[in-house]
Amino acid sequence: MRSRAPVIIALLLAAALAGCGSEDDCCALPPKEIGYDVKGGYPPFRQELEIGEDGRATLLIEGFRQPRKATSFTVDPTKLDAIRGDLDAVDFDALVVPERSCFDCPSYEIRYGPDEFAANRATIPPELIEIFERLDHLVDGAGDSGVSGGRRPAAGAPRAP
């Protein structure tokens, strides 16, 4: 009786190779969820944006003497791909937060899959400014938040010392 081991090994190898049409098909990482929270400021407010893997988003907005408001929407796939591409390029472990304080500045927190980072308006690293602006644009486009003040200045504008 002949050994079946070479046949079994050949079949297993063929099955493993057939499972991947290309590296992109086989080894691409699944999309990650994105969380973006802005809190504090003066007058105090809170915005919490959660974007699921499929692009469905929920925005919670609360402001000083304003009722809590929740909005659901779907993020345009092109915009979402751009944001994810920017976030994929960030080395969260290497981000450096300058040692500055800001009494009434809002605090920002971003979560991307297992990575997260928090800073206040005066300590946002340059690597995150454009990403935060893209996310702010999504928040602003999700409806009239009625929240004013405490927002970060546009890129290139002077920042708090």
Image (cartoon, grey):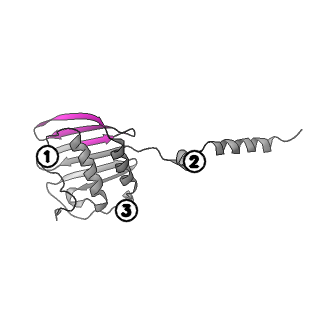
Cα separation, mark 2 vs mark 3, equals: 32 Å
Q: Position of residue 92 (x, y in %)?
A: 37, 57
Residue type highlighted by circle 3? Ala
- Of residues 65 and 141, the one nearer the viewer is 141
Q: Earlier in the sequence, mark 1 or mark 3?
A: 1
Magenta includes 62?
yes
In contact (CB < 8 Å): disc 1 and disc 2: no
Q: Earlier in the sequence, mark 1 or mark 2?
A: 2
Q: Tag 1: Cα neighbours inside 10 Å, few (<14), some, or many (≥20)?
A: some
Q: Position of residue 54 (x, y in %)?
A: 39, 38
- Discs 1/2, front: 2
Instruction: Name the residue carrying label 3.
Output: 94
Identify which residue is drawn at 25% across, 38% down.
59
Quarter of the image that includes the N terminus: top right
Instruction: Name the residue carrying label 2.
Output: 22
Question: Which image quarter: residue 67?
Answer: top left
Q: Position of residue 84 (x, y in %)?
A: 37, 49
Instruction: Name the residue carrying label 1.
Output: 44
Question: Which image quarter: residue 47?
Answer: top left
Identify which residue is drawn at 73% across, 41% down.
11
Identify which residue is drawn at 48% across, 47% down.
29
Up-down: is 35 above or below 126?
above
